[in-house]
Amino acid sequence: MNGRRGLVLWFLLPSLLVLAGVVAYPFVFNLWISLTNWNMFHFQHPQFQGLGHFAKIARMIGEPFARPLSQWPAAFAGNEFYRIFGKTFAWTAVNLVFHFTLGLGAALLLNRKLPARGLYRALLILPWAMPQYISALTWRGMFNTEYGVINQLLAKVGAAPIPWFSSEFWAFMAPTITNIWLGFPFIMVIALGGLQSIPQELYEAARIDGAGPVRRFFHITLPMLKPVLLPALVLGTIWTFNNLNVIWLVTDQGLPADKTHILVTYVYKAAFFYYRYGYAAAFSVFIFLVLMFIVRGYDRVAKQEVY
Amino acid sequence: MNSRRRVAKAWEMVWVHALVWLLVLFAVFPVLQVIGISLRPGDKLYSTKLELVPPHATLAAYRIMLTEKPFFHWLGNSLLVSLATALIGVALASLGGFALSRGRFRGRGGVLQGILMTQMFPATMLLLPLYLLMRKLHLVDTLGGVVIAYVATALPFCIWTMKGYYDTIPAALNEAALIDGCTPLSAFMRVTLPLSAPALVITALFSFMTGWSEFMVARVLLASQDLMTLPLGLESLFTTYQTEWANYAAGSLLVCIPVVALFLALNKFLISGLTLGSVKG
């Protein structure tokens, strides 16, 4: 018995070694960087400086609270940290809501007896199959204010062109639309798999008891899908929260004038454009902690082990 | 009564189709755009026309990509990297997932949480330390170094998928093989693994996709022209002076075709194999 237990651990060892080398070691190294003054001016010989960067982040977070209550709305709105923080949450929430409604909707439609169902399913998977950087650059072209197909279609129906990359609101919408497009097929596939394993007898029994389609959905479909959708929600939250590519590529590094940043793109710019490695490292530790907190929250709410 | 039901049924079909077509249009539209751009003649790249097939459509961009650019060289590198990633990814994830599904050891919950936590840290910030580590191991500017990084990128999700699938297979099957005298390893290989085909296919597909589409890591770790993978090659078409849009679009489609074909061929497995958790019927 002991031998078998040992064998199972051997099975796990290669994976753990790879993850230790490529993820855990850089993570610890990153913790060290966050305690140094590594930046453009101390590039060759970064020095240990302790929790300075974390103190700076804490000051940024605390700044509006130091003002009198009446000034809070203006203070929060004017604070760069809260703008980026708020945008990250808005970005994550809007994306997830659409991923789940479109993905679940598509799965429910395709779970019916439909002619050419296989073809529809194949076409709906396309956004997922295309490499992400290609899709992001394609969408950026489509959002082009002058030549992009979206504004041209709007012109066809007589609508005013949308200033995609010069207005803060639209510059946020452009990557959001792109990412909704990118992400819904994943949820669709997961939901389809879940739907197919729900026993039909449950629906028949509910029908005999007089439950309509809406009640059947909320009392059978959704609860039965919970075990598959909950992990997808957790992964989706993490992936969307930390999605660098789409915002970076679609808004061309944060157009207009660095107004379209979420936490990860902000960190990326700080590290690789302004060479503030120490600061960026500290900030990414903060992002990590925020995500840990959110996932813990899901755990509580769902009362189910997520992992 | 009967005819009223039939009318209701027909209406239902109408709106179901309308919704499906709307979604399909949304999904396919950008792809059609890329096809359109790839067919444009070089001097008409900024067209304000909306036709899908542009006037004076030409396959010149495809010819240029396939004959004048080192496309097949990039393709070779990408294939090598992606296949190696898929192979190693499947081997590690199928074993690791099994340990986490069947093993009852201390720290199992911790490992599962740790695997999820690897996704929470902004991956780009790991690039710099990773580069320094790879340099120490003399893996910078080698395809091997890139493969190791990709395996680690794909592994957490793959282990999760495998573990979720193993959870749905009755453990008794494996136990029976053990009682019949199989060694634990051969019981795993002969009984559990064949039953897990759908999840193995997903794992292979994901690992392959990671290698095929990844850009950032390759950009940091690879310097030689000779080692460029397809994403790097496509990026090289964006030069400071002009962007070869038609070539880029044609190249993009050529890059997409193999993965899309793979996705469609494995469509069936995709739905049955992706068990992040299991529905207990």
Image: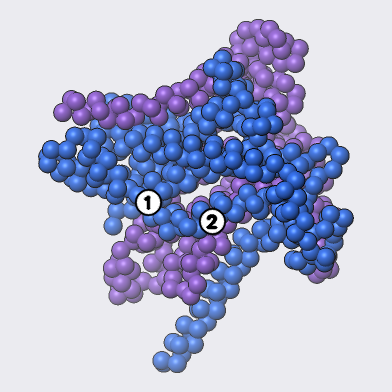
> Which amino acid is tagged 2?
Ala
Front residue of A273 and A67: A273
The residue lying at 51 percent from left, 54 percent from top is B263
The residue lying at 63 percent from left, 61 percent from top is B28
Q: Chain B: give its colour.
A: blue
Q: CA distance from mark 2 to mark 1?
A: 17 Å
Residue under numbered circle 2: B261
Disc 2: CA contacts within 10 A as few (<14), some (14-19) or many (>=20): few
Front residue of A214 and B199: B199
Viewer-side label of 2, 1: 2
Q: Is residue B162 left or right of residue B243?
A: left
Disc 1: CA contacts within 10 A as few (<14), some (14-19) or many (>=20): many
Mark 1 — on which chain does it sit? B
The residue lying at 70 percent from left, 59 percent from top is B35
Tell me, for residue B198, which label it has, or none. Answer: 1
Q: Are marks 2 and 1 in contact (CB under 8 Å)?
A: no
Shown in purple, the chain is A
Q: Of the two numbered discs 2 and 1 on the same chain, state the one appearing first in sequence.
A: 1
